[in-house]
Image (tube, rainbow, N blue to C red):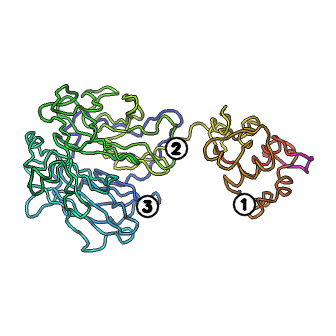
Amino acid sequence: MLTPASRPDVARAGGATLPSGFVDTLVDNGLTEPTAMELAPDGRIFVAEQGGALRVIKNGALLAQPFVTVTVNSDGERGLLGVTFDPNFETNGYVYVYYTATTPTIHNRVSRFTANGDVAVPGSEQIILELPTLGPPQHNGGAIHFGVDGKLYVAVGENGTGSNAQSLSTPLGKLLRINANGSIPTDNPFYGSTTGINRAIWALGLRNPFTFAVQPGTGRIFINDVGATAWEEINDGMAAANYGWPATEGYTNNPAYVSPLYAYSHGGGGSQGCAITGGTFYNPDVSQFRPDYVGDYFFADLCNGWIRRYDPQTDTAMGFATGIDMPVDLKVAPDGTLYYLSRGEGSVHAVRYLETDSDGDGCSDPQETGPDPGQGGGRDPNNFWDFFDTETENDLNSGTALNGAVSVTDVIRVVIHFGQTGNPNIPPLSDAKNFNVYHTRFDRTPLGPEPWNLGPPDGAVSVTDIVAVVEQFGHHCI
């Protein structure tokens, strides 16, 4: 693994500095030389340590017992380097790892283990892929992920020999594509022109693809290739693509090669670095960040300790986080949280978007005072009017449609949609169709300063009444 000794300009700063509205939270910092991480479907975080232990962070705490510990050669950039979960993990419990095995020779291997809770079933290792015997200890690659096609993609470095990247007689310097059981798909681009393990080659011309990512939904693959002396690359993963190493590094006009989507130069600037070591798409099930982040690709640099984001739609990159001690991996959770793995700190951090909560009520200021219909909340009567003034339940899912008046029916729809508070003053869902009950509950006279003391009915449901009731009994951020 890349170390400060091999990259003398590595930053050793503390926690991340983020844009306004984002918060960095430490998850755990008890890891030793971590190299990669993966998020389990149930929320656990599995972290590979270079020395061979696959650790588990569960409910925010690092478990004392590793999931499994494999025997590795950890010289240089070797060791336990990659981890991923089977697409059917919740039923079969399969966990895949990429590591540098010590027998019968020193070589990289992909194996599968079966989970039993937080540990692997003893003796469950199934070897999926054996790579060639290694020479020098550098450029091992190591990232593994399943594509949306159900195939396992394996990133392999050229082991310090540039010519390997261009040769179809070795899997080194390639992105490989295999079946989950280790067999090779017959539709691989070089299946008919190669033999043996080389039939697994899906793309070539890579130096050290330490990380790559698969975009949820589209299946698009971005490959991070660590450069030599000048450029770091983000490559668009395509079958049979040749990215040009060692003939080219960085952007190229040579039609024989696929030029990077984005490349950045070596140096000490805020957009420069020395080793691209993390990548993930921001396409969560629930988008927590601002809409302009959706579809962007986060990537990190080990040496300068930053995270930036690349927008494939505009072909531009911009800053995001700085001051991270040797980031090596990035992941986005289904709830929209961005996780980063700090090798220098031995930690996992969570980045969330909270914006500013001036009144401390758990809702950000834009959620409380936003000018657009459907984005109101908190104490702005006009925004509350827009929020509760809805035509149908579908309008709540796709953006509020206004009919010009807040009715009891509107109130019922909104409260059902966002759930109950459990307070006896708000009827349960079983009473949701009782218009009179809801009318009575929301027809209140606010008395005194906040928190509101609710007086008797005044004969009509008004915007002030809605504000008063929701403020009294808890409101939802919109």
Q: Compare marks 3 and 1 and give the one earlier in the sequence.
A: 3
Q: CA distance from mark 2 to mark 3?
A: 22 Å
Q: Secondary structure at mark 2?
A: loop
* Residue under pointer 2: 288
Which range is magenta?
453-460
Residue drawn 86% across the image and 48% down it = 444
* Lower position in the chain sequence, tag 2 or tag 3: 3
Q: Position of residue 382 (x, y in %)?
A: 75, 34
Q: Mark 1, residues whose alpha carbon is within 10 Å: few (<14), some, or many (≥20)?
A: few
Amino acid type at mark 2: Gln
Circle 3 sits in a helix, a strand or a loop, which is it? strand
Three-letter amino acid code at the position of disc 1: Gly
Image coordinates for residue 114, horizontal then vertical, percent: 31, 69
Q: CA distance from mark 1 to mark 2?
A: 26 Å
Q: Quadrant of residue 8?
A: top left
Name the kind of residue labelled 3 in the image: Lys
Q: Does the segment drawn in magenta span residue 136? A: no
Q: Of circles 3 and 1, which is in front?
A: 1
Query: In terms of image quadrants, where is residue 89?
Result: bottom left
Q: Would you name the residue on which mark 1 appears? A: 422
Residue indicated by mark 3: 58
The image shows residue 383 at horizontal and vertical percentages of 72, 36
x 19%, y 43%: residue: 240
